[in-house]
Image (cartoon, rainbow, N blue to C red):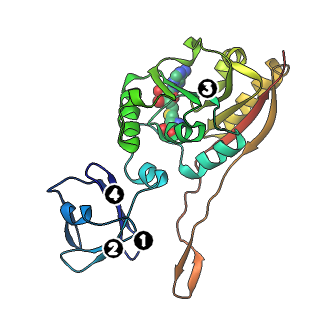
Amino acid sequence: MKEGELILLEDKKGKKYLFTLKKGGVFAFHKGKILHDEILKKRAGQTIVSSKGEELLILKPTLRDFVLKKLKRISQIIYPKDVGQILVLADIFEGAKVLEAGTGSGALTLYLIRAVGEKGKVISIDEREDMVENAKKNIEEFYQKRIEEIKSLTLKRQNLAEIEEKDFDRVILDLPDPWNYLKKVKEVLKEGGILACWLPTILQVFELTEKVEKEFSKDFVLEGIFETLQREWQKRKIALRPKDRMVAHTGFLIIFRKLKS
Ligand SMILES: C[S@@+](CC[C@H](N)C(=O)[O-])C[C@H]1O[C@@H](n2cnc3c(N)ncnc32)[C@H](O)[C@@H]1O
């Protein structure tokens, strides 16, 4: 483990603690304290014992851990379970040129950067400066790099109506009124490219699909409307059953293909 790195400690019940390692730092929780210097001597996969005798597993956090436990949210975010569906159904590939609006807290952006790889390009825009600033901090914290060093990403304050760059392979919209930007998406998305919209309510889904049917049926074809329910199970001795709680609703994913004009 190195100073400045993100670290995940996991107790026997699966409770996770995520923080940044600092020389001289102390991690304190209800079962005692652990010196960061002691963790720095260890490797991922090893265990460490707190001052009150609690054994914890040392791990490097996954991006999912980071999004759920550390990412600073000033907007609603797209949950990792839904990101999985977006990456597959919008077919985000290595080397893809992707437009994302809005950035929000950057939860999806973090995954897009990884999915397109160094040869790809993510242009992520948000009309709000505070969103862009907060997302920048989240991205820098997870990737442990200054944003300028992430060459595959352009993050900027911009309204979707103002975007001029063209020839995107994929466009992903997580904003409340995507139907108002269909003309713009038609201009910037490649023929055959995929438009993925994320919407929390079915009334929005209806408004979007109606607008496409009535005014853009020559430009987009609806591929599908999807919802993802993820039910986690527990294993406690013989009590092998679904957990009591689950995230019941997040949103709907609507996928369109751009037609040749
Ligand atoms: C729900 S948040 C996006 C959350 C993001 N997907 C995430 O996972 O963190 C919606 C964002 O869209 C932005 N937004 C709304 N309309 C916009 C527009 N026309 N152009 C650019 N950004 C817009 C808002 O400022 C807001 O930050």
- Labelled disc at residue 177: 3
Q: Position of residue 196 (x, y in %)?
A: 68, 34
Residue to which mark 1 is pinned: 14
Residue to which mark 4 is pinned: 7
Q: Position of residue 237 (x, y in %)?
A: 51, 87
Under 8 Å from ligand 1: the CB of mark 3? yes
Check if mark 3's residue and mark 2's residue have beta carbons within 8 Å.
Answer: no
Q: Nearer the viewer, mark 1 or mark 4?
A: 4
Residue lying furthest bottom: 238
Q: Residues within 10 Å of mark 3 (few under 14, many from 20)?
A: some
If you read the primary sequence from the N terminus, does the residue marked by circle 3 or circle 2 appear first?
A: 2
Q: Residues within 10 Å of mark 1 (few under 14, many from 20)?
A: few
- Labelled disc at residue 47: 2
Q: Residues within 10 Å of mark 2 (few under 14, many from 20)?
A: some
> Mark 2 to mark 4: distance in Å?
13 Å
> Mark 4 to mark 3: distance in Å?
38 Å
If you read the primary sequence from the N terminus, does the residue marked by circle 1 or circle 2 appear first?
A: 1
Q: Amino acid at mark 4?
A: Ile
Check if mark 4's residue and mark 3's residue have beta carbons within 8 Å.
Answer: no
Q: Position of residue 132 (x, y in %)?
A: 41, 27
Q: Position of residue 7 (x, y in %)?
A: 34, 57
Q: Nearer the viewer, residue 202 or 47?
A: 47
Residue 63 shown left or right of residue 134 in the figure? right
Name the quadrant containing residue 173: top right
Q: Amino acid at mark 2?
A: Thr
Q: Nearer the viewer, mark 4 or mark 3?
A: 4
